[in-house]
Amino acid sequence: FDADSRWALAWFEQFGFNDGPFGDAETLSKAKNTALNGLEAAGIVLKRTGRVRLLRPAELTSDWNPATDERLTVWETVHHLVRVLDQGEPAAAALVAQLGAQAETARELAYLLYTICERKKRATEAFAYNSLVQSWPEIVRLAQDINIPVAPQQEGLFG
């Protein structure tokens, strides 16, 4: 996962979507090689005087487009998928079609978040992530039927 998502994952494990101390957030950002201003710019945290918290899926913007997001994170992708899944699998499929290969990494993070929620007894969040993971095969099937031009990804060193 990207540095911002690794920060968010560690923060979520400790605080969930609740407020936490700014100092803890700052220390964790240094450990994860990111910055709180960058996390805020990425659209995944809310900073207030002395407090920081992750944005909930319902707080994310409805006009989000991964193709134009200048600081795209896996964390943000998962939570937009959770948000649009409330509108149905076709809506999630449209987003998965836009994401292309990046969608699979989002599924992996959703499963990991579900596991954390189960362990921490966070039933509401666990349900949201489990719904995404359980719906994934149908979402992918629907996404394959959508013809959205996706910018080609750069080949790796060995193709």
Image: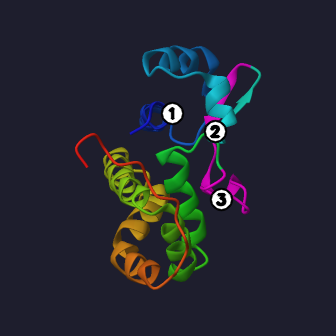
Q: Nearer the viewer, residue 20 or 30?
A: 30
The stretch of residues the image draws in magenta is: 50-68
Q: Nearer the viewer, residue 117 or 154?
A: 154
How far apart, in angstroms, are the residues tagged by discs 2 and 1? 8 Å
Which residue sits furthest right? 49
How far apart, in angstroms, are the residues tagged by discs 3 and 1? 18 Å
Which amino acid type is shown beneath numbered disc 2? Ala
Q: Main secondary structure of the magenta part?
A: loop
Q: Is residue 19 visible?
A: no
Q: 10 Å neighbourhood of mark 3: few (<14), some, or many (≥20)?
A: some
Q: Are marks 2 and 1 in contact (CB under 8 Å)?
A: yes
Label 2 or label 1, whichever comes before in sequence order: 1
For the point 59% across and 38% down, which residue is it?
18
Above or below, 98 against 16 in this view is below
Label 3 or label 1, whichever comes before in sequence order: 1
Q: Please give the label number shown on residue 47.
A: none
The label nearer to you, 2 versus 3, is: 3
For the point 38% across and 39% down, which residue is it?
1
The picture places residue 83, in percent across and down from the top left corner, at 59, 64
Q: Is residue 73 magenta?
A: no
Which amino acid type is shown beneath numbered disc 1? Asp
Q: 10 Å neighbourhood of mark 1: few (<14), some, or many (≥20)?
A: many
Q: Which residue is mark 2?
A: 42
Which residue sits furthest left? 158
Q: 10 Å neighbourhood of mark 2: few (<14), some, or many (≥20)?
A: some
For the point 64% across and 45% down, which residue is it?
55
Which amino acid type is shown beneath numbered disc 3? Asn
Q: Which residue is mark 1?
A: 4
Total numbered labels:
3
Q: Is residue 13 visible?
A: yes
Q: Which residue is mark 3?
A: 65
